[in-house]
Image (spheres, grey):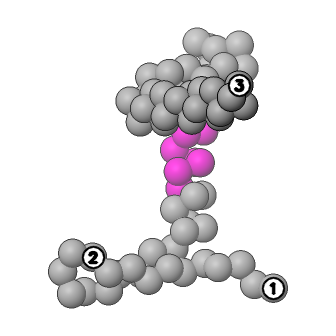
Amino acid sequence: MPRLRIIYCRSLGTRTERFDCIEFKRRSQAEIMAEYEAREDEFASYADFLNARARDSEWQRALRERLSMAVGMQSSDADT
């Protein structure tokens, strides 16, 4: 089965745009790897770099907070 490669999305206007999700993922990974290679002397491992990057990300902090709240809700439901 072929992988989904192109997604068509409608912007706020009327123009339909083409979005290549595979290319976006590859570009993002290349940018992250380039940043790691430029800063690798600051970290013991690639995992340490990713964890530090996640700690510095406002989006990651918000996501972790939401996830911890969801886990907290599940554990309080199990207590009842």
Q: Nearer the viewer, residue 70 or 75?
A: 75
Q: Which residue is mark 3?
A: 79
* Overall secondary structure of the magenta section: helix
Measured as percent of width and height from the top left, residue 17 is found at 35, 81
Look at the numbered disc 2 and give the secondary structure of its residue: loop
Measured as percent of width and height from the top left, residue 2 is found at 75, 84
Front of the two marks 3 and 1: 3
From the image, which quarter does the N terminus lie in?
A: bottom right
Q: CA distance from mark 3 to mark 2?
A: 45 Å
Q: Tags 1 and 2 in contact by the CB under 8 Å rule? A: no
Q: Is residue 79 left or right of residue 59?
A: right
* Residue that sits furthest to the front in the current view: 80
Residue drawn at 53 percent across, 51 percent down = 28
> Which circle's residue, 1 or 2, is located before the other in the chain?
1
Residue drawn at 66 percent across, 19 percent down = 48
Q: Which residue is mark 2?
A: 11
In the rendered view, tell whether residue 19 sits above or below residue 46: below
Measured as percent of width and height from the top left, residue 12 is found at 21, 75
The verdict on residue 77 being magenta is no
In the rendered view, tell whether residue 17 sits above or below residue 27: below
The stretch of residues the image draws in magenta is: 27-37
> Which circle's residue, 3 or 1, is located before the other in the chain?
1
Residue drawn at 65 percent across, 33 percent down = 77
Among the 4 quarters of the image, the one containing residue 43: top right
Look at the numbered disc 1 and give the secondary structure of its residue: loop
Q: Name the residue type under label 2.
A: Ser
Residue 53 visible in the displayed image = no
Q: Is residue 48 left or right of residue 15?
A: right
* Residue that sits furthest to the right in the current view: 1
